[in-house]
Image: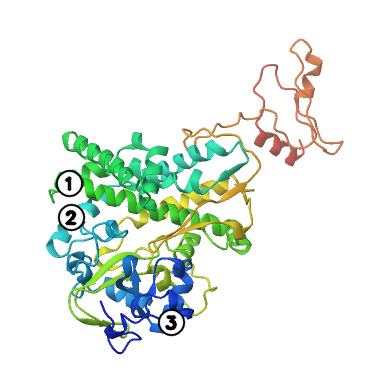
Amino acid sequence: MTPESHTTTDTDDLGVSPPPGCPAHSLGPGGLHRLYGPEAQDLGALYERLRTEHGAVAPVLLHDDVPMWVVLGHAENLHMVRSPAQFTRDSRIWSPLLEGMVKPDHPLMPHIAWQPICSHAEGDEHLRLRGAVTGALTTIDFRSLRRHITRYTQILVNRFCEAGEADLVGQYADHLPMAVMCEILGMPDEYGDRIVHAARDMLKGTETAISSNQYIVDALGRLAAQRRAQPEEDFTSHLVTHPAGLTDDEVREHLRVVLIAAYEATANLLANVLRTVLTDPRFRAQLNGGQMTVPEAVEQSLWDEPPFSAVFAYFAKQETELGGQRIRKGDGLLFAPAPGNVDPKVRPDLTANMQGNRSHLAFGGGPHECPGQDIGRAIADIGVDALLMRLPDVELDCDEEDLDWSESIASRHLVELPVRFEPKPQQDVMEKPGLQPVHHRRTNWQVGTPVPEPAPAAEPAAAADQAVTAPAAPQQPVPAAEPVGARRPGAWQRFLRWWRGY
């Protein structure tokens, strides 16, 4: 990809470097901005600078100075993902890859390399693979799902509720989505610290990322083999037995995509909503005052801080134009929800409330729109609500400015969210909602003046005291004493007696 002459750079400029000391000295070949390195420490600010310089679509450089376009406009992002005739997710047509500019060990290769999965396929193959995934998702019982989410929220909160302090990222937001997804896939026994750490390690791209990825792939491979031999009522079984006839490799790879994508997106979403609740007094006041529901708070977060900042990637199938830029066949483009959601054309006032508005880009669009977004919403909705119910006095245990983020082109992950609260007792995670113990009914309810307890049967003279007394007029007759052992009138009957003056 090389921008044409109507942009700020041209092919002849690629070998020209700014003089030492120039503010542009940190720029790459052709004066293009890099989406990595020192210049990209604040990608949000960089995106706005690119919007000012280039408009809705801007030329940038990935690692190793590989050229790419980043789509900054809301309408332009939607046009790209909704135009499969013009743009594909099949990276095998990407010009820098074909020309050898992208090496096998490129840091972003795991995100860009083509795989036999529905998110990289198109046409009939896409329909076959996507149909299997969506078909398996439709078998999920959302009532059962909500019960699973609620149970895991209680399990996780029980781990730290007595301590009076916690890290809501490492001890809650990073764990809840993985626990629920393992339940959905049919491998609840695999959930634990090991698989959470493996997923997080793989997403960070550390030196042990390959072994962490292999750990997850092996677990999913075992699961697929077990369900092919003996299907059960879970997502994996329905994926294996779907009429589309997925191979073992296709099943395993789709399980991996579903698990990791849902985990990362939902963990980020849950952490972002909790951070906003804890740091924005107005936001929390609206929740407490009933002016905003938790689902509305989640949608606001999806606008302000989408779980994925950018998605790798779309590729031009033909020469076209997007956002005033000439896009050549084989060019790569980043689908970018983060800058797209703050496009001034759709959000001129970023402080405006976006409650109830689901036109954000957080879950993509078009043929590759996230099929499991309702699961992510449910985990975030219940996860936030359950935590605030258990710990209503929870507060941030540091200055907001001290919060640390791990940022990459793909996402912005909150590293830690320390909180404090009054220690709380653990709860029974197996207790079913609505079946709490019922208090014993009182037998001595009364209206009016207190009534002495009935005297023993051996004292008949005191039997008259058993009658319900009330502030009646002196001339009113007093009812005869009830026989010893007679059933005492209920509260309603005693109330009627008092009301009528007996």
> Any mark on residue 116, and which?
2
Q: Residue at x 28, y 74 (%)?
A: 80
- Label 2: few (<14), some (14–19) or many (≥20) C-alpha neighbours in 10 Å: some
Q: Secondary structure at mark 3?
A: loop
Callout 3–callout 1 Cβ contact below 8 Å: no
Q: Quadrant of the C terminus?
A: top right
Q: Earlier in the sequence, mark 3 or mark 1?
A: 3
Residue at (24, 50) in percent of width and height:
254
Evaluate if marks 3 and 2 touch, with contact meaning CB atoms under 8 Å apart: no
Q: CA distance from mark 3 to mark 2?
A: 46 Å
Q: Which residue is mark 1?
A: 249
Residue furthest out toward the right: 474
> Which amino acid type is shown beneath numbered disc 1?
Asp
Quarter where residue 399 is shown: bottom right
- Image point 42% across, 65% down: which residue? 37
Identity of the residue furthest to the front in this view: 20
The percent position of residue 272, horizontal first and vertical second, equals 50, 58
Front-lying residue, 250 or 106: 106
Depth check, front residue: 325 or 261: 325
Nearer to the camera, 502 or 263: 263
On the image, the x and y values in percent for residue 278 come to 59, 56
Q: Residue 106: x and y, percent?
A: 29, 60
- Residue at the top extreme, as displayed: 458
Identify the mark at residue 19; answer none if there is no mark. 3
Instruction: Give residue 105's quadrant in the image.
Output: bottom left
Q: Tell me which label, 3 or 2, sits earlier in the chain.
A: 3
Residue name at image x 37 percent, y 43 percent: 198
Q: Amino acid at mark 2?
A: Pro
Q: Which mark is residue 400?
A: none
Q: Disc 3 marks which amino acid?
A: Pro
Q: Disc 2 vs disc 1: Cβ atoms closer than 8 Å?
A: yes
